[in-house]
Amino acid sequence: MEPEDGIKLYFFNPFHTDVREQLLPFYVREDFVTSPTASSKLNIFQGMPIRCTVFPRNPTLLPWDTLPESFRSARYVQQSVQASNGSGGLDGMLLGNLAVAMNFTAETMDASDRLEYGYRLPNDSFVGSLGDLLQYRTDVSFNIRFMKFYDTDEIEFLHPIYSDRLCILSPKSLEIPQWLAIFLCFHPYVWASFVVIGFVGGYCWYVLRRWGLSKMRRYRQRLRRGDRAQCSVLSIELWLVLLGASSTHLPVRMIERLLLTVFLIANVIISGTFQGTLTTAFSTKSYYKDINTLAALDRSALPIATSSRSLLDIFGNTSLSPLYQSLKGKLQILNDSARHRAAYERDVCCIERYSDVHLIINTEYIRPDGQPMLHVIDECPRVYSLAYIVRKGWQFAPLFNAAISRFVESGLCMKWYADTEDALIAQKRIKQMIEHREESMFRKLTVIDMQTSFYIMAMGISVSLIVFIVEMFVASGV
């Protein structure tokens, strides 16, 4: 029979040495686990050992010696890491604080077969920490994982810690060569506009001049110099104006002068913009466009690698989307680190949690000049909640859920995660500054930076010389 409000419920606690204290009275409200009376009786384990499976994973669970020295000096870090047997990060600090709050002894162990999270084999047996849990070698797997189906109904999740997106990391786009960066400083449409403006302006000038000639013939006026200039000549003249050179065909009619005045003003704007953009192209590094959508990832033909078999359902199992079906066909299992291969060999993409990407890139995969080696694709195909797992029906799960919910709702879990992330990034930045302190952040422009202009001059002179020689032979043949 379900208890009603006002009924006193007794909870049996076998860990008290005094027999009279083994029956603990609880005043039932809505749920005895989360009632105010129960909150004062979470500390009931009396040092009882709880077997916990943990394995290193950056940045959620880090060994003590890998934590930054400044971070290790914090008192709350020392207490939690000591209680969790030397584990830092979000998982380690939550385990340590749970052990202190609930007064149990954390007996930590690695996965017996070193397969970390674990998965189901074709013979229906399980490996990794998942197998240790199902085979009663451990009580709790204290590496946070996604809340989804792991091919068994014999596990359950504790209170979720936070939610996270599962994203794809692609190799960072390469740097544009200096000689090519000058031509890519403007969008191709802008370059096309420059070319079209010259020809269209020349044609407009030609039309205005023909209109002026028709009026001169009507009133039998004398032709002036340049009145019979061809459309190609006038286009070249306007190109000279746009490029800042002087024109040999100065208009004498007011309407033509207005057109030339407009192009002179355009010359000031275009030349200023062009010079500023060229300066930016010379002084800064430019990169090719990164992959930002799943459709672009599919077109890139890069395979998607992961070392975790549990992530093979990132694009769903029965998705009706042709894009997701195509991407799912590119998934492959790697025994080595997929993100290391994506960063250095640049022939695959990898899968990571979005919350971990910022720390991973800024501490492991960043070049000495501060540029990242990996890029996060904006579209993330999956969103999960994350939690710890225990065996289904584990008798202490309600007490652990009650304690974890208090840490989550108070914001401590996110604080521990953010503190660890900031400490690791600061340590990496300081190390890079020490290693490259003699390198100047500023660089002088040299002749090598201007090599493109010399190439263009050499090409122009070569073409002009070829045309001159051809004209010489044609003239001599005539």
Image: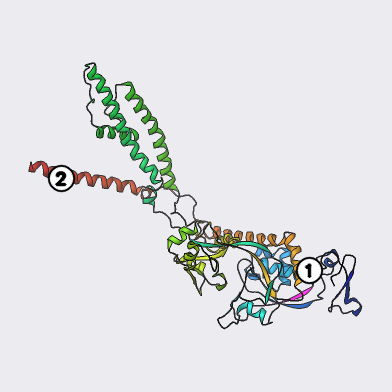
Amino acid under disc 1? Ala
Amino acid under disc 2? Val
Magenta-drawn stretch, dominant element (helix, strand or loop): strand
Q: Secondary structure at mark 2?
A: helix
Q: Which residues are magenta?
A: 103-110
Residue 151 occupies quadrant: bottom right
- Is residue 312 one of those drawn in magenta? no
Residue position for label 2: 470
Q: Is residue 312 left or right of residue 132?
A: left
Task: Check residue 110 in the rendering and tell me which mark sits there, or answer none.
Answer: none
Depth check, front residue: 133 or 107: 133
Task: Work out whether 290 lies above or below 93.
Answer: above
- Is residue 104 one of those drawn in magenta? yes
Q: Residue at x 28, y 45 (%)?
A: 457
Depth check, front residue: 149 or 17: 149
Question: Is disc 1 in contact with disc 2, using a CB cutoff of under 8 Å?
Answer: no
Task: Check residue 101 in the rendering and tell me which mark sits there, or answer none.
Answer: 1
Q: Residue at x 70, y 62 (%)?
A: 413
Depth check, front residue: 19 or 54: 19
Q: Is residue 385 left or right of residue 401?
A: left
